[in-house]
Amino acid sequence: MLTDIIQSFYTIKMLHIFMSLSFLFFAVWLFIRSVNGIIKQKSYTKTDKILSYCFIIALYLQLVFGFILFSNLGSEMGFSYQSADSSLKMVSKRLWPIEHIVMMLFALFIANLGLIITINTKSDRRRFYNTIIYYSISILLIMYSLSAIYLF
């Protein structure tokens, strides 16, 4: 029973990591296409729109897997922060999952807002600008949330 719980936890964690890497791939590809579209005055194509949707879908899938990981699935595995050496880190890391989820929800909201504004914009150049601005804010929020566990 415990081995099944551990196996499912690691499977979901690996899916979460895979979705994070695919999100990173879509983010970099979308950023390069947007910068290239601004510099070379290209038109906003169906590929750019599909990449934006893939960006958002990857964020939603990360949210779903993150909620599963945050649920009681991992609580029975015996993970705890109880050690004398890391008592100071315990205080700073105990609220990290909640802070991470809140930041991820806010990043997803910003990315969705950017998608809506980008789709409703008529100018191709402005679409690329909106893509860069909103998705960069979303990526910065994600990077801050992930770095908070290691830096603070």
Image (cartoon, grey):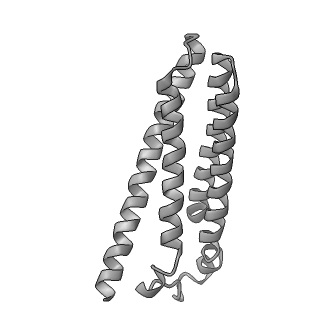
Task: Identify the image quadrant of the C terminus.
Answer: bottom right
Q: Which residue lies furthest to the top in this view?
A: 41
Q: Is residue 147 visible?
A: yes
The residue closer to the viewer here, 122 or 19, is 122
> Would residue 56 appear left or right of 15 to someone viewing this image?
right
Instruction: From this view, report whether residue 103 is shown above or below residue 75.
Output: above
Q: In which quarter of the image is residue 100?
A: bottom right
Task: Identify the image quadrant of the N terminus.
Answer: bottom left
Residue at 48% from the left image edge and 40% from the top image edge: 54
Instruction: From this view, report whether residue 46 is shown above or below residue 89.
Output: above
Q: In which quarter of the image is residue 119?
A: top right
Residue at 53% from the left image edge and 68% from the top image edge: 67
The x, y position of residue 55, in whole percent, is: 51, 41
Q: How many labels does the image show?
A: 0
Instruction: From this view, report whether residue 88 is shown above or below residue 51.
Output: below
Instruction: From this view, report whether residue 120 is shown above or below residue 145.
Output: above
Residue at 29% from the left image edge and 84% from the top image edge: 3
The x, y position of residue 144, in whole percent, is: 63, 53
Q: Can residue 152 be seen in this view?
A: no
The residue closer to the viewer here, 61 or 7, is 61
Residue at 43% from the left image edge and 40% from the top image edge: 25
The x, y position of residue 103, in whole percent, is: 66, 58
The x, y position of residue 75, in whole percent, is: 48, 84
